[in-house]
Image (cartoon, grey):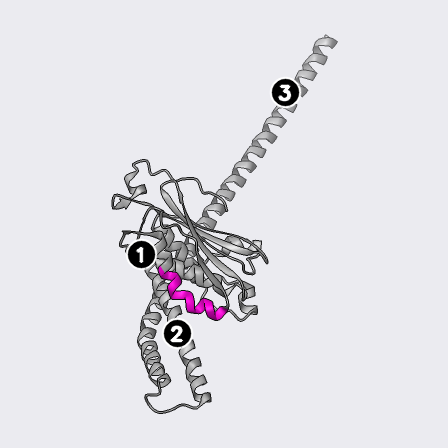
Amino acid sequence: MDIESSLSDENQQLRSERDLLRRRLAEVEQTFMRTVQESQAEILAMNEALAQTNAQLRELDRMKDAFLSMVTHELRTPLTVISGITEMLETGIYGDLTSLQAEHIRQIGAQSDRLRHLVNDLLDLSKIEAGMMRLHHEAISPFSLVEMVIEQLLTFAAQSGVILLNRVSEQLPDAYCDPRRVEHVLINLISNAIKFTPRGGRVTISAETAGKRLRFCVADTGRGIPADALPRIFDKFFQLNTSTESGIKGTGLGLAIVKHIVELHGGEVGVESIVDCGSKFYFTLPAARGGKSAMENDPSRISPSRSTF
């Protein structure tokens, strides 16, 4: 009887401990579920707040773009008038100018030109971001395209003491692109290279075939770009500290426009640079074949791998 009583007591104690553990486990489970529900509610509230903030930011961005577009359109007419009158004054149509007057008029002309370039860049960027820029493709010789841009920049290069070299072969296949837009790309890249290359340096433009594409390269012997700036170099309004320190001013829009135009053509753009050794900007365009781009004729649309400098 003592053994049976002892076993009964032990069983009762074990059952009590089991029931206690079950109650504690149920309490823990309830606490856990309550915590999960509270966390889910908190996450949902945060997601809703984030969605509202994003919607407000998109609306502010749209309003900013609309404001910039309106302002730039309104600035074009007075800038055209200022430039026209400045040119007439420079020719002496209203009488001879003293050296001081001529210098002041030259500064007016230079600043109005700078402001006009900014207005044009803003308008171009607004068109691109709004999906309103249309390309007019045609087949054109890469050599002729580069030569045409070099001729426009020869005076600027000579004033800067920089040599321009066209190393594009006349034997390359035609590019299938919008010549006017690609001309804008080349002018931006080459003029930037001239600005940041010291006197006695050179800017070399080359091109090569890369699968069904043409790969253009603008290389300079300038000051180079710091490694930490390379990922942001094509961002809107991004400017290197060296440009402000050296007095070289720009809009910070040129390379952003370059990237957009190249990507509209289905190409890629990039840069490699070493400080104090120079920079190499490259971009790709479709090669023409039978009046159409080689990429357009290729049903697989396989992008060739990018080669290195």
Number of the label disc, if any, that sits on residue 113: 2
Number of the label disc, if any, that sits on residue 15: 3
**Residue type for callout 2:** Asp
Instruction: Indicate which label's residue lies in the foreground, 2 or 3.
Output: 2
State which region is magenta. 148-160
Along the line of sight, the residue nearer the viewer: 10 or 224? 224
Residue 222 is situated, as x and y percent measured from the top left of the image, at: 54, 60
Along the line of sight, the residue nearer the viewer: 5 or 223? 223
| Crowd class of label 3 (few under 14; some 14 to 19; many from 20; radius 10 Å) | few
Q: Secondary structure at mark 3?
A: helix
What is the magenta segment's predominant secondary structure?
Answer: helix
- Does the rendering let one see residue 56? no
Along the line of sight, the residue nearer the viewer: 190 or 44? 190
Q: Is residue 159 above or below residue 231?
A: below
Which residue is at a point 37% across and 44% down the rendered structure image?
Answer: 213
> Relative to 85, is 205 on the left or the right?
right
Q: Which residue is mark 1?
A: 179
Q: Is residue 45 above or below residue 158?
A: above
- Quarter of the figure with residue 13: top right
- Does the rendering let one see residue 37? yes
